[in-house]
Image (tube, rainbow, N blue to C red):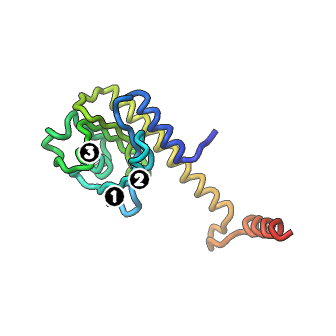
Amino acid sequence: LTMPLAELMQEAVQLVHARYPSLVAGVLRRMPDGRAAELVASSVADWVPVVIDLDDSSLTGRSIVRNEIVASDDVVSDPEFPHQTATARFGMRSALSVPIPDVGHPWGAVGASGTEPRQWTEDDVAFVDAVAATLGAAVRRQQLESQLQHQALHDGLTGLPNRALVTDRIEHALDRSG
């Protein structure tokens, strides 16, 4: 059983939000240039799409840039993060961000944040880490399926469409014309 990646991301957000109903949950995807991340799923519908810069000054940025779990019990009083970061900009006080694994660098991050200070427990971190690992496996599976589909329909040496793809395209054209 498979579902589109976007739906899986939203399901993951709903799972985190169901466990922590007072918190906002979200998934951010690292942009191809690596300098920003886009919110692709959120428990707050009107937050999608939000784009944040990826650097060490934001909690989520640090999580993705350094490929590590980053948490703050109170980002407003935390000397590690400037107050104008995305977390504080959206009225969040506590935040937890876990990178979603991918080949070479994180695909993005899954996180939870709240409007009140919160002490993150080992169980909180383990739960969100498990969600991130599951999303990472789904991302990798989608990448491999796309790669296999391309390999099945293109010549390995030239990269040109092979007989199976050409035959399929001709059949579709004939179906449309007839």
Disc 2 from disc 3: Cα separation: 15 Å
Where disc 2 sits, the SS reads loop
On the rendered structure, is 57 left or right of 142? left
Quadrant that contains the N terminus: top right
Amino acid, disc 1: Ala
Where disc 3 sits, the SS reads helix
Amino acid, disc 2: Pro
Residue 35 location, quadrant: bottom left
On the rendered structure, is 132 left or right of 68? right
Q: Residue 28, position in %: x, y?
A: 39, 49
Residue at image point 53% right, 47% down: 5
Mark 2 and mark 3 residues within 8 Å of each other at the beta carbon: no
Visible in this render: residue 161?
A: yes
Total marks shown come to 3
Where disc 1 sits, the SS reads strand
Amino acid, disc 3: Thr
Q: Mark 2 or mark 1: which is in front? A: 2
In the rendering, which numbered label is found on residue 49?
2
From the viewer's side, name the closer residue of 161 and 79.
79
Q: Residues within 10 Å of mark 1 (few under 14, many from 20)?
A: some
Q: Earlier in the sequence, mark 3 or mark 1?
A: 1
Q: Is residue 5 above or below residue 16?
A: below
Q: Residue 161, position in %: x, y?
A: 68, 70
Visible in this render: residue 107?
A: no
Disc 3 from disc 1: Cα separation: 15 Å
Check disc 1 and report the residue beneath it: 36
In the rendering, which numbered label is found on residue 87?
3
Residue at image point 47% right, 37% down: 12
In the rendering, which numbered label is found on residue 177?
none
Quadrant that contains the C terminus: bottom right
